[in-house]
Amino acid sequence: MARGLPKQKPIAGVKEVIVVASGKGGVGKSTTAVNLALGLMANDQSKSVGLLDADVYGPSIPKLMNLKGNPELTDKNLMRPLVNFRIPCMSMGFLVEEVAPIVWRGLMVMSAIEKLIRQSKKIIQFAQHCCSFHYHNDFFHAGRLGNLDYLVIDMPPGTGDVQLSITQNIPIAGAVIVSTPQDIALLDARRGAEMFRKVNVPVLGLVQNMSVFQCPKCNHQTHIFGSDGAKELAQTLGVELLGDIPLHLNIRETSDKGQPVVVSFPESPEAEAYRRVAAAVVHRLAVQPR
């Protein structure tokens, strides 16, 4: 460990942490994170999976997982993660009003992320103080995500404070980079992959999202954002292309309804595409050096 960097501490009860990242926003990273988590569990029902929303400024997990409301408290005054589709979720979106902007500087964001990860005391008072969002109980604590085989972290876009804070403080089993085949998205995806390499986080591979659009009437396929861009980038970086996710109305509609396609249409080609990505992630975790 380089001098001056914090010592990494595992998250209690979590076997492997997978971060889902992108160099830029708007490429479907959060949708991929949610369906990856569901795909991991769909492929192996014996596995337990959790979701952590690290995108403090724009939390998407509550909407995508159809979760809202105040978390319940345990008898020890700990906040229970909200659960849907058998996946426990933690997000700043549970602690602030849905449309309330989070106007925080970097140190405040990193403090909130640390509290969500470490489950330290008074996360709700922290959010209440910074966001002027009021709760009736003054002694809420953050709860644990429980014993998990996989914790999927939906990272914010970019390569800034949150990414560095997470990678420096907890051991990451691997990073999944999401990009569209478009050249401008691939430039930022490459920056994201190189960032993880610099902080010694294994890059498990790339997911090529919105890879192709198939007309529902004539079945003609159109590569709206380009063809095979992420595949070529994966070859350049020496990593795997974990899979292609099509640009499909079904994915968008199910995401907006909080009914991810992996659980709402499990037999669809779109759901199968996410399950293949999940299987590829598990394979990469199994074969990479430890």
Image: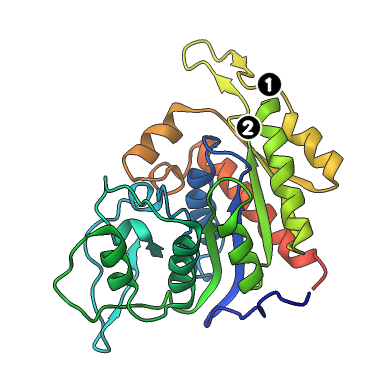
Which residue is located at x 58 percent, y 49 percent?
A: 275
Left-right relation of 222 to 41:
right
Residue 213 visible: yes
Which of the numbered marks, if any, corresponds to residue 226?
1
- Where is residue 147 drawn, in percent x and y? 48, 79
Marks 2 & 1, CB-CB < 8 Å contact: yes
The front one of 197 and 112 is 112
The front one of 178 and 93 is 93
**Mark 2, residue position:** 180
Which residue is located at x 48 percent, y 77 percent?
A: 118
The front one of 218 and 21 is 21
How crowded pointer 1 is (Cα within 10 Å; few <14, some 14-19, many 20+) is rated as some
Which residue is located at x 73 percent, y 53 percent?
A: 195
Residue type, mark 1 in image? Gly
- Which type of secondary structure does the marked residue at label 1 adopt? loop
- Which type of secondary structure does the marked residue at label 2 adopt? loop
